[in-house]
Image (cartoon, rainbow, N blue to C red):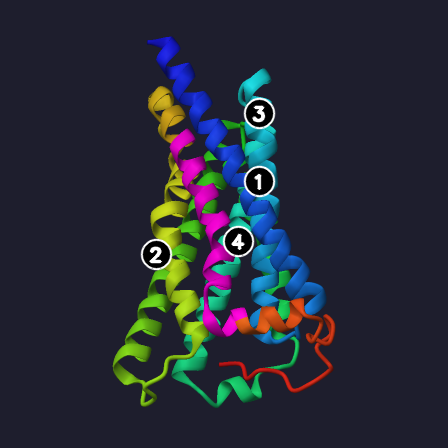
């Protein structure tokens, strides 16, 4: 009945708040360590931006969950949260693709322009701003043409599909390259980090992406998708909250962060000491 649905909704929102607060602490710690304490390298630039996107997403989701207790659904917060979710997906695709290039063409890593990571991250943030309005069309204002919204939504959904496809293909290439073609018995920790994040997104982030892709085209199933949205939001919070744990649990990265915590990181610019190799 309605009372059971209300109880279920409260439980999900409570879990979302707890996950959101924990994820904010974890991603905030990563922002502080990688932004101000650890030495800067191409890898840490991507992870710094990824932690920022997850921090913003979890912040919006936490605020949304708290407001839902008293005011019900807040479409504006959902749209803003989806913006940061798309930015996180784009950054994950970028870091996966670049590592795929490094694995296939080892010499390329030595010839890459100095600010490639920073420019790529800036491009991902800018493109995310262009993709989200297609999914928000008609949600924030009722005056938009149905055909215009559908066309914009279709283009945006195709871009989302291409992003997810690029993530899957690059991760498979990485896996094959490392497991089957690598001459070294020891695997670089960066590969492990990327290959752990991709299954995490597949199981916990993909439902949220699917919801936003089909919600405007299957409006007749609004009641079901309302239930699906609650589950997808909770899983998306798991996706964003778990990434710091994956990073901190990696032995090599944990050593770097311990040195940064102890004050030996040399500051955010990374000028002191010798930087870690890209791979």
Residue beneath disc 1: 21
Residue beneath disc 3: 74
Residue beneath disc 4: 88
SS at mark 3?
Answer: loop
Residue 265 image point, x, y percent: 68, 74
Question: Which is more N-terminal, label 4 or label 3?
Answer: 3
Query: Would residue 221 be counted in the magenta stretch?
Result: no
Question: Which is more N-terminal, label 4 or label 2?
Answer: 4
In front: label 2 or label 4: 2
Find residue 199 and name its label: 2
Question: Which is more N-terminal, label 4 or label 1?
Answer: 1
For the residues labelled 3 and 4, the Cα–Cα distance comes to 22 Å
Residue found farthest to the front = 262
Which residue is located at x 68 percent, y 64 percent? 35
Q: Is residue 95 above or below residue 152?
A: below
Which residues lie in the magenta part?
Answer: 230-254
Q: Which quadrant of the view contains residue 5? A: top left
Question: Which is more N-terminal, label 3 or label 2?
Answer: 3
- In this view, the residue in front, 20 or 120, is 20
Q: Which quadrant of the view contains residue 67? A: top right
Q: Is residue 278 above or below residue 92?
A: below
Callouts 1 and 3 close, C-beta under 8 Å = no
For the residues labelled 1 and 2, the Cα–Cα distance comes to 23 Å
Which residue is located at x 41 percent, y 41 percent? 235
- In this view, the residue in front, 113 or 199, is 199
For the residues labelled 2 and 3, the Cα–Cα distance comes to 30 Å
Which residue is located at x 65 percent, y 58 percent? 31
SS at mark 1?
Answer: helix
Question: Which is more N-terminal, label 3 or label 1?
Answer: 1
Q: Is residue 109 above or below residue 61?
A: below
SS at mark 2?
Answer: helix
Residue 140 image point, x, y percent: 59, 27
């Amino acid at each position: 009945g309605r009372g059971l649905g209300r109880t279920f909704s409260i439980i999900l929102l409570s879990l979302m708040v707890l996950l959101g607060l924990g994820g904010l602490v974890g991603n905030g710690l990563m922002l502080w360590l990688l932004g101000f304490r650890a030495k800067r390298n191409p890898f840490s630039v991507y992870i710094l931006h990824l932690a920022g996107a997850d921090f913003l997403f979890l912040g919006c989701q936490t605020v949304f969950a708290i407001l839902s207790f008293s005011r019900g659904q807040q479409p504006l917060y959902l749209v803003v949260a989806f913006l940061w979710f798309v930015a996180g997906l784009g950054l994950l695709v970028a870091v996966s693709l670049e590592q795929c290039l490094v694995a296939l063409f080892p010499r390329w890593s030595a010839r890459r322009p100095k600010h490639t990571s920073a420019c790529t991250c800036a491009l991902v943030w800018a493109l995310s701003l262009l993709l989200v309005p297609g999914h928000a069309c008609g949600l924030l204002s009722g005056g938009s043409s149905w055909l215009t919204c559908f066309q914009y939504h279709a283009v945006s959904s195709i871009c989302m599909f291409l992003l997810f496809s690029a993530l899957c293909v690059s991760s498979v290439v990485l896996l094959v390259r490392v497991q089957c073609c690598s001459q070294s018995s020891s695997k670089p920790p960066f590969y492990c980090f990327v290959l752990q994040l991709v299954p995490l997104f597949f199981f916990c982030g993909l439902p949220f992406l699917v919801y936003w892709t089909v919600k405007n085209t299957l409006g007749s199933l609004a009641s079901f998708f309302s239930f699906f949205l609650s589950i997808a939001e909770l899983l998306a919070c798991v996706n964003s909250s778990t990434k710091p744990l994956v990073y901190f649990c990696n032995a090599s990265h944990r050593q770097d962060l311990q040195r940064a915590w102890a004050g030996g990181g040399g500051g955010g610019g990374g000028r002191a000491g010798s930087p870690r190799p890209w791979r």
